[in-house]
Image (spheres, grey):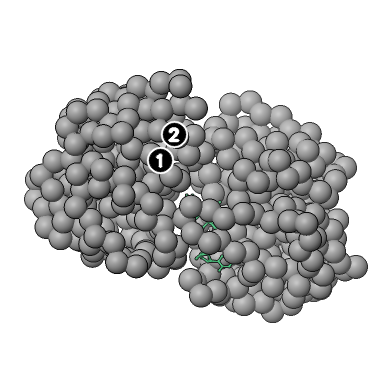
Amino acid sequence: MDKILVHGGRSLEGDVRIGGSKNSALPILAATLLTKDRCVIDRVPDLSDIHYMLTILSQLGCEVERASGVVQVRAEKIRTEAPYEIVRKMRASVCVLGPLLGREKAAKVSLPGGCVIGDRPIDLHLKGFEALGATVTVKGGDILLEAKELKGARINLRGRHGPTVLGTGNIMMAAVLAKGTTIIEGAAEEPEVVDLARFLSAMGANISGAGTQQIEIEGVKELHGANHTVIPDRIEAGTFLVAGAIAGKRVTIRRAEPKHLGAVLEALKNAGFDLTQTEESVTISPNGARRPLHLETIPYPGFPTDMQAQFCALLSTMDGTSVVTETVFPQRFMHVAELKRMGASIELDDHRATINGVERLSGAPVMASDLRASAALVLAALPAEGITEINRVYHIDRGYEAIDEKLNALGAHIERVKV
Ligand code: EPU
């Protein structure tokens, strides 16, 4: 198990290239199960979550080849049971349910367990599958889906905490091969849903409305192989912008999609940072004049929950009192206790953090609890005094490609130590 040591106090300057989106690539790879033909997916990031997904596809019977960022999958003959040993490692494994049901009218996948960012139910996915005509049984820790045929239906996927991203993807993937028309109401509008719809359309699916709250899918008889390039990772992009804000002189993110970063760019501007952008890049130049923020996480196009921890780190180092409210995963504040170990002043009240900026954080041994919380600890450590030792960094490798090397290339001093 690796740990990383961040030697604080270096300032960052330069350009960083953003990789393909993890949360786009995962359901897109699952969608290759929908055809017997070869699919070629480009700009697939090299992350452990992607590795788990490719292993699941192999175990389901797919031929999988990977060369740098390009993954080829051929799902000529497939099985419908995903092995528990791998599924349990990654909650996003649930996104093979939709394509298995769509193509084979059957699926058996383990029910994902709890997760440190909170209780993560999949009731909305299951409600959608039932509406399409599947029988859903939960037995021995597995979800079993079976259907004689799938029929288009009108399904509302909005839950107590808003729409569901993977749920919207799962129902789209099951509905593309159903008979008739499916209308998803309360659909997630995230760019990752739009990217999946683009890939499914390239495979021959008939989908309209992706990126809005209502998606319409006209079922087709079969899908064919397709090539696709995954969109840039907006959360990796946002994380490096916060790195620039917290410890930078001038940092430019390249190969990004600034259009997907609206709420994050607005928050950084409101906090007083200078931003300049082109079609595929954003440059952040801290200018000294910083203002505290009131932030609330909201499904896209609102401020993303996946950037909440990183902003908590930033706001901890800025003058004044900021308030951060988490509405998507109300319990997603595992980073707060660790930031406090570094000297941050944060009060948690239910799903709201009140942050009083301190002059300087100090390095400490801390524990990574989940992906974005780990990123927040790395960011907090950049301007901190002394060395921060971050344990359990496998969390960060799930979603950031070589974050230590990329930050070092900008001037940080981060060591990875094998334990
Ligand atoms: N929810 C339900 N029932 C369901 C599904 C979700 O109540 O059946 C609730 C969740 O508990 C949560 C809210 O709805 O309160 C939104 O959850 P959503 O289903 O949208 O989350 P997800 O699709 O499982 C994806 C990303 C997460 C990201 C969320 C929200 C992937 C692989 N994961 O999860 O990414 O936080 O959308 O934007 O796409 C991350 O990358 O670090 C990460 C956790």
Please state which of residues 313 and 233 is positioned toward the viewer in this rendering: 313
Residue 136 in percent (x, y) is at: 78, 67
Residue 368's disc number:
1
Q: Is residue 178 above or below residue 411?
A: below
Residue 17's disc number:
none
**Tally of marks:** 2
Q: Is residue 149 above or below residue 225?
A: below
Q: Residue at x 23, y 41 (%)?
A: 342
Q: Are marks 2 and 1 in contact (CB under 8 Å)?
A: yes
Identity of the residue furthest to the right in this view: 148
Q: Is residue 329 above or below residue 115?
A: below
Q: Is residue 392 above or below residue 241?
A: above
Residue that mark 2 sits on: 393
Q: Residue at x 31, y 45 (%)?
A: 338
Q: Residue at x 63, y 64 (%)?
A: 122
Disc 2: CA contacts within 10 A as few (<14), some (14-19) or many (>=20):
many
**Residue 240 visible in the picture:** no
Residue 398 in percent (x, y) is at: 51, 39
Residue 346 in percent (x, y) is at: 23, 56
Residue 105 in percent (x, y) is at: 85, 60
- Kind of residue at badge 2: Val
Regarding mark 1 in the picture, which secondary structure is present there? loop
The answer to whether 408 appears left or right of 371 in the picture is: left
- Kind of residue at badge 1: Ala
The answer to whether 31 appears left or right of 312 in the picture is: right
Q: Quadrant of residue 366?
A: top left
